[in-house]
Image (tube, rainbow, N blue to C red):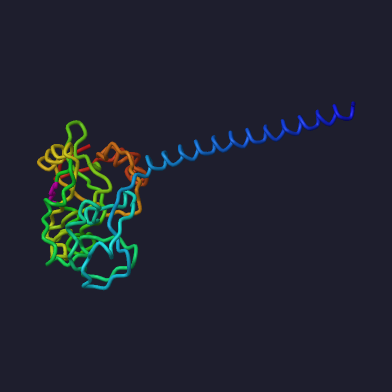
Amino acid sequence: MKFLIDKKKIFNKRNYLIISAIVLAIVITYISNISRIQYIRQVREEFPTSKIICANVDLKEGTILDKKNIATVSMLNKNITANTVDIGMIDMIIGKAIGTDLKAGDPILLSNIKTKYLNQTLSDRIPEGKRLFTLQVQDSSQDLHNGFIRPNDKVDILASIPLEGRGNTVFTVLQNVSIVAIGKASIVSQELTPNGTSISFFVDNKDVEMLQFAKQHGSFSISLRNPKDLERRQSSGIDVNSFLDYEGINKVSGGGKLKIKEKGKLIN
């Protein structure tokens, strides 16, 4: 009798352990799924993507694009430029010939399409909520003429404006801007060689007035950046005082005690 009771206790204990293990496994699985869902949501928020068009198979120059040889893939928004063909432009490229060889998976760019088949103006490429803005660039004009900077390159835009109380001040107004056009050379033109000293780019509607004000009261220059460099730095600008205090400059300026002359006048 005692043996049967002990056996029953052992059996109940074993069942308890099995049920506990099952419940624990369910809880762990549930927590794991919740964590995975939260992780996926966080990744999507931090690294948003959009659908773009790519080659579905290897394509030779002159191939006519159709729905069989193209596909849609997701691409990080930060890697999409004004030259990228997104899903909303699929009807624009169907039936058009490509002007270069493409490998399967290569994104299709507007510059890949033979321009004689692509009837598109810059206004067609302006995203909603954006405006095309053009600036005359002074200090970087030689880089433009030499072809060092081309449409689709990423640049920072700097302005030099005389401010009351600070004098001439240089500061960065926009960062990581994609160049849409340099002179007549643009992302939709047959002209590929940059010419002129004007650059055009897309900006938020709210930035247009700021840029126009800076355009009327100052001058601009641009700084070419690596397209993989996504860093955005904060700066209050450089005036004569902060220039003299700058590391390296401070050592040769007598600890900021020297004065700077401009056209024979002391400006500090």
Give the percent coordinates (x, y) of residue 178.
Answer: 23, 52
Give the percent coordinates (x, y) of residue 112.
Answer: 22, 65
Q: Is residue 94 left or right of residue 69?
A: left
Instruction: Reply yes or no: does residue 135 show up in magenta.
Output: yes
Give the percent coordinates (x, y) of residue 23.
Answer: 63, 33
In this rendered view, identify the residue nearer to me: 31 or 154. Answer: 31
Above or below, 262 against 184 in this view is above
Query: What residue appears at the point 85 percent right and 27 percent down from the top-left corner?
Result: 5
Q: Which residues are magenta?
A: 132-136
Residue 85: name its quadrant. Answer: bottom left
Instruction: Reply yes or no: does residue 256 show up in magenta.
Output: no
Image mark count? 0
In this rendered view, identify the residue nearer to me: 135 or 125. Answer: 125
State which quarter of the image contains the N terminus.
Answer: top right
Residue 228: name its quadrant. Answer: bottom left
In this rendered view, identify the residue nearer to me: 2 or 226. Answer: 2
Q: Is residue 93 left or right of residue 8?
A: left
Majority secondary structure of the magenta segment?
A: strand
In this rendered view, identify the residue nearer to me: 70 or 19. Answer: 19
Q: Is residue 26 left or right of residue 55?
A: right
Query: What residue appears at the point 19 percent right and 38 percent down from the top-left corner?
Result: 267
Above or below, 33 against 229 in this view is above
Give the percent coordinates (x, y) of residue 207.
Answer: 18, 39
State which quarter of the image contains the C terminus.
Answer: top left
